[in-house]
Image (spheres, rainbow, N blue to C red):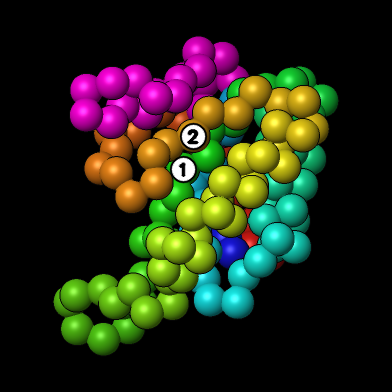
Amino acid sequence: MRAVLQRASHALVVVDGHEVAAFDRQGIVALVGVTHGDGQDQAATIARKIANLRLLDGESSVAQRRAPVIVISQFTLYADTRKGRRPTWNKAAPGPVAEPLVDAVANCLRERGLTVGTGVFGAHMDVTLTNDGPVTILVEA
């Protein structure tokens, strides 16, 4: 499992013209990709990293600041671009495997008392954010 964490001062996720998640203060947008063989342990590790990495102002964490998080499924994090001009997605787990694990990341964060929004699995999403810093980190479990 891997995630791209972006520190943002504003974020918004829209699906079919409807806002499904947003925040207007410093928080994290987490794009989460799942690969074959990932399970609950990887989901818990990614959630722990999202909550505890010191990515916010003053070297504080999401958990310390009770900062908002938006978790968005992102199978394209497992794109293979080594050959040709068209990426392959063979390393990305199929939806029935990936969806519950992305949900598990969000639920692990909620269990820590954090405010968590999510995208809509498999939907076309318009994601708008103001990258703060910019700070963008790749984490893997």
Hey, what amino acid is under mark 2? Answer: Thr
Disc number placed over residue 72 in the picture, else none: 1
Q: Element type at marker 1?
A: strand
The answer to whether any part of residue 135 appears in the image is yes
Q: The C terminus is located in which quarter?
A: bottom right
Using a 10 Å C-alpha cutoff, classify the residue at mark 1 as few (fewer than 14 neighbours), some (14 to 19) or many (20 or more): many
SS majority, magenta: strand
Q: Position of residue 17 (x, y in %)?
A: 22, 22
Which contiguous range is marked in magenta?
Answer: 4-26
**Residue extending furthest toward the left:** 85
Q: From what the image shows, is residue 29 above or below residue 45?
A: above
Numbered label tally: 2
Q: Nearer the viewer, residue 123 or 45?
A: 123
Identify the residue at image location x=59%, y=64%.
Answer: 1
Q: Are marks 2 and 1 in contact (CB under 8 Å)?
A: yes
Hey, what amino acid is under mark 1? Answer: Ile
For marks 2 and 1 on the same chain, the one whose residue lies earlier in the sequence? 1
Give the CA distance from mark 2 to mark 1: 6 Å
Q: Is residue 61 left or right of residue 13?
A: right
Residue beneath disc 2: 118
Using a 10 Å C-alpha cutoff, classify the residue at mark 2 as few (fewer than 14 neighbours), some (14 to 19) or many (20 or more): some
Identify the residue at image location x=65%, y=23%.
Answer: 115
Identify the residue at image location x=71%, y=26%.
Answer: 114
Q: Position of residue 3 (x, y in %)?
A: 56, 54
Q: Element type at marker 2?
A: strand
